Image: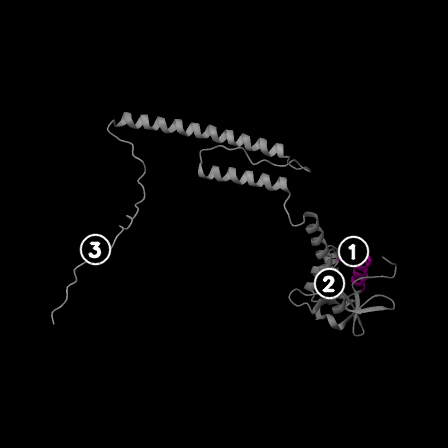
């Protein structure tokens, strides 16, 4: 930062202003300012030091720096300015920013430039991320996700199964085909063990039912009723009653 370059300083007509917020949320054409000339000398000096400090100059909005700073009496600057009704809302187009001698720009024009720069940087970042991934998921990540999904589907259909937790890639690395294959084999073995256990439990339940009542005959679940297929051939003639005239 050049020694004579100071942010947040401008003029409203012939009066010096310090811009606390360049834009008001929901009212982009308005801004919030204070007029240093109406403050007492100790407040002016304290606030000016905040403006010229590294914290003040690095802040996008002066209000952020004032919020963390105190007046000589120990009160927060921003909160006190608000309570004392020192903060004014005016049109950004009426404020001329004067960051240094011989340089000036309307605040609404400055806001437009800064907003476009911000959108541009975000667009560049997004394009870089898209270029890095080319809009595709890494093959190893995709295969691992598919394997986990299948295991979850099986577990949902068979609540009694105790499947291994989803395989996670090591920090800063990727899963190899060998890792994914080994995990799939392990899950398959678990499914087989669960299936054998369920068959054994079903046999035990049948024996217990037979002991309780030997006359009970195990029946399969009733099959859904299916409408009979229509018979081939010409439809049978039906009698139709006709009223006599």
Outermost residue to the left: 244
Query: Splitting the image into 4 quarters, where does residue 212 fall?
Result: top left
How far is disc 1 from disc 2 in space, using C-alphas? 19 Å
Q: Choose the circle earlier in sequence order: 1 or 2.
A: 1
**What residue is pinned by disc 3?**
236
Please tell me whether residue 50 is drawn above or below residue 195 in the rendered image.
below
Q: Residue at x 50, y 30 (%)?
A: 190
Left or right of 156, for residue 123: right
Q: Say left or right for 117 vs 227.
A: right
Earlier residue among tags 3 and 2: 2
Of residue 185 and residue 107, the one placed in the foreground of this image is 185
Report if residue 75 is visible in the image: no
Residues at marks 3 and 2, CA–CA distance in whole angstroms: 82 Å
Q: Quadrant of the N terminus?
A: bottom right
Q: Which mark, residue 116?
A: 2
Q: Is residue 15 left or right of residue 208?
A: right
- Side of 178 relative to 115 (left or right): left
Residue 213 percent coordinates (x, y): 25, 28
Residue 173 tag number: none
Could you classify mark 2 by the number of other residues whose Cα lies within 10 Å: few (under 14), some (14-19), or many (20 or more)? Answer: few
Instruction: State which tag comes first along the sequence, 3 or 1.
Output: 1
Tag 1 residue? 58
Q: Which residues are magenta?
A: 41-59
Quadrant for the C terminus in the image: bottom left
What sort of colour scheme is used for the picture?
one colour
Neighbour class for label 3 at 10 Å: few (<14), some, many (≥20)? few
């Amino acid at each position: 930062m050049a020694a004579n370059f100071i942010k947040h300083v401008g003029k409203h007509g012939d009066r010096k202003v310090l811009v606390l917020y360049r834009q008001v949320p929901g009212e982009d054409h308005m801004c919030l300012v204070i007029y240093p000339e109406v403050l007492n000398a100790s407040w002016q000096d304290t606030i000016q030091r905040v403006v010229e400090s590294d914290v003040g100059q690095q802040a996008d909005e002066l209000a952020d720096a004032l919020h963390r700073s105190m007046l000589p009496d120990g009160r927060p600057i921003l909160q006190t300015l608000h309570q004392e009704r020192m903060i004014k809302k005016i049109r950004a187009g009426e404020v001329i920013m004067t960051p240094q001698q011989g340089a000036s720009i309307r605040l609404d024009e400055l806001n437009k430039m800064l907003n476009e720069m911000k959108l541009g940087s975000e667009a560049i970042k997004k394009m870089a991320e898209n270029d890095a991934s080319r809009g595709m998921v890494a093959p190893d990540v995709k295969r691992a996700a598919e394997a986990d999904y299948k295991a979850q589907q099986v577990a949902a259909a068979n609540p009694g199964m105790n499947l291994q937790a989803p395989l996670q890639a090591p920090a800063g690395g990727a899963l190899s085909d060998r890792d994914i294959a080994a995990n799939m084999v392990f899950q398959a073995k678990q499914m087989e063990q669960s299936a054998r256990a369920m068959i054994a439990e079903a046999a035990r339940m049948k024996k217990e039912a037979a002991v309780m009542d030997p006359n009970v005959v195990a029946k399969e679940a009733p099959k859904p009723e299916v409408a009979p297929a229509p018979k081939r051939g010409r439809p049978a003639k039906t009698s139709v009653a006709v009223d006599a005239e």
